[in-house]
Image (tube, rainbow, N blue to C red):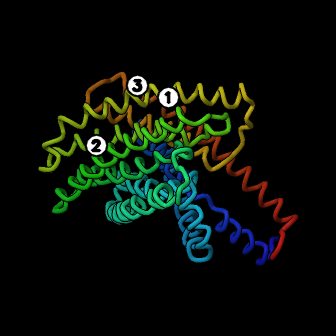
């Protein structure tokens, strides 16, 4: 039986070591739940919704504890080129969960999550780039540009998706929600271009080793997919004046993002083969693996959304197949997560370390 001191030490270590990007677990689980709902699998979708909600609650509690008890770790992560942008997964996870709840009829809770997600993206949108890029004191940040930087885009587009989803059933605040969706979508499209330039320059100017091409590079595709979904959702806002001026424009931009994301898909698979097969980089569980699962699920959502809005049935068919690919990846990731938790729990139980 685990002693209270051992359990407390385990939780303290979990809060201390929590990766800023761990909310990608909620992002991945939430979007696949939405995908399953779209293809008519309500029971399975509901199960994943509860997993996403539980994961969000646990990660939120650990994050609050971490902020209160380990502020130096937070500051260190904020200035880390490889971890700083991971804080945007909180924004995206909040809004993906909010979108899922909105679709399930929990509009008030979803609206509250939209407020949290929107405020966090605005604050992080200034704090993270400043800490990671502008306060390097002579160091060159370009060499650290990587796929995780695209989570900045994902976070902004997640606000647009949730706002557009709520707009369809909103009352007096419909115009405000439409404006929020449009502004966040447009700004995030611009940020995608900025981040893409930084990452492209890093890949061409600096030497690339197999260990550098980590799973978060998949977020480049995830950002195109969620930009596609956001544009398609905005195109359905026909009842709000703010949506009328763009409903013929956003689907075209969404098609461009979808096409580019489709091109990235096999390229990222080839990069994974080059990294893990040719150069034998071990493939084990890490929080970054959820950065692969989320884009897979979001690509399915992009196919469904764009295919429906643009009336392209083949895209809907591709989305139906992609859902199961994403769900299989989620199952593998979740089993690996449970195995890692069991392994670490067993090790700490046998070797509690200092304070145990």
Query: Mark 1 to mark 3: distance in Å?
Result: 17 Å
Q: Which mark is residue 317?
A: 3
Which x, y percent locates residue 187?
Answer: 30, 49
In the image, taking residue 351 as reference, residue 178 lies left or right, namely left
Q: Earlier in the sequence, mark 2 or mark 1?
A: 2
In the image, taking residue 186 as reference, residue 206 lies left or right, namely right
Which x, y percent locates residue 278?
Answer: 71, 25
Q: Along the line of sight, which residue is nearer the eye, 35 or 70? A: 70
Q: Along the line of sight, which residue is nearer the eye, 47 or 77? A: 77
Q: Along the line of sight, which residue is nearer the eye, 121 or 231? A: 121
Count neighbours of disc 2 (C-alpha within 10 A) and say few if under 14, some if 14 to 19, many if 20 or more. Answer: many
Query: Mark 2 to mark 1: distance in Å?
Result: 22 Å
Q: Residue at x 69, y 45 (%)?
A: 285
Which x, y percent locates residue 115?
Answer: 34, 65
Residue designated by label 1: 265
Frontmost of labels 2 and 3 is 2
Frontmost of labels 2 and 1 is 1
Count neighbours of disc 3 (C-alpha within 10 A) and say few if under 14, some if 14 to 19, many if 20 or more. Answer: some
Count neighbours of disc 1 (C-alpha within 10 A) and say few if under 14, some if 14 to 19, many if 20 or more. Answer: some
The answer to whether residue 21 is seen in the rendering is: no
Q: Earlier in the sequence, mark 1 or mark 3?
A: 1
Label 3 sits on a secondary structure element that is helix
Q: Which mark is residue 196?
A: none
Q: Along the line of sight, which residue is nearer the eye, 344 or 354? A: 354
Q: Is residue 329 above or below residue 140?
A: above
Which quadrant is home to the C terminus?
Answer: bottom right
Which quadrant is home to the N terminus?
Answer: bottom right
Label 1 sits on a secondary structure element that is helix
Q: Is residue 174 above or below residue 277?
A: below
Residue designated by label 2: 233
């Amino acid at each position: 039986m685990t002693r209270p001191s051992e359990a407390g030490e385990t939780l303290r270590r979990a809060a201390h070591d929590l990766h800023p990007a761990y909310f990608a677990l909620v992002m991945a689980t939430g979007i696949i739940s939405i995908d399953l709902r779209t293809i008519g699998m309500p029971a399975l979708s509901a199960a994943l919704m509860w997993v996403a909600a539980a994961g969000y609650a646990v990660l939120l509690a650990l994050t609050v504890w971490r902020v209160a008890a380990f502020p130096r770790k937070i500051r260190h992560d904020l200035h880390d080129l490889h971890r700083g942008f991971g804080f945007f997964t909180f924004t995206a996870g909040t809004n993906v969960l909010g979108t899922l709840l909105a679709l399930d009829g929990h509009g008030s809770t979803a609206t509250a999550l939209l407020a949290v997600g929107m405020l966090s993206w605005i604050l992080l949108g200034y704090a993270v780039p400043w800490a990671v890029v502008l306060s390097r004191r002579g160091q060159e940040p370009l060499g650290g540009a990587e796929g995780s930087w695209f989570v900045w885009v994902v976070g902004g587009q997640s606000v647009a998706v949730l706002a557009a989803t709520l707009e369809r059933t909103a009352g007096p605040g419909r115009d405000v929600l439409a404006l929020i969706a449009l502004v966040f979508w447009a700004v995030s499209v611009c940020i995608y271009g900025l981040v893409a330039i930084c990452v492209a320059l890093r890949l061409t100017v600096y030497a690339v080793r197999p260990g550098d091409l980590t799973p978060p590079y998949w977020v480049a595709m995830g950002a195109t997919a969620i930009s596609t979904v956001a544009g398609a959702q905005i195109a359905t806002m026909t009842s709000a004046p703010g949506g009328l001026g763009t409903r013929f424009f956003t689907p075209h931009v969404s098609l461009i993002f979808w096409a580019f994301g489709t091109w990235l898909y096999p390229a990222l698979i080839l990069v994974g083969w080059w990294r893990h097969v040719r150069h034998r980089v071990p493939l084990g569980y890490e929080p970054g693996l959820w950065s692969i699962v989320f884009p897979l699920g979001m690509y399915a959502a992009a196919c469904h959304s764009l295919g429906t809005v643009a009336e392209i049935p083949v895209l809907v068919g591709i989305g139906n197949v992609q859902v199961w690919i994403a769900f299989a990846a989620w199952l593998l990731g979740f089993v690996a997560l449970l195995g890692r938790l069991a392994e670490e729990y067993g090790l700490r139980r046998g070797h509690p370390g200092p304070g145990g």
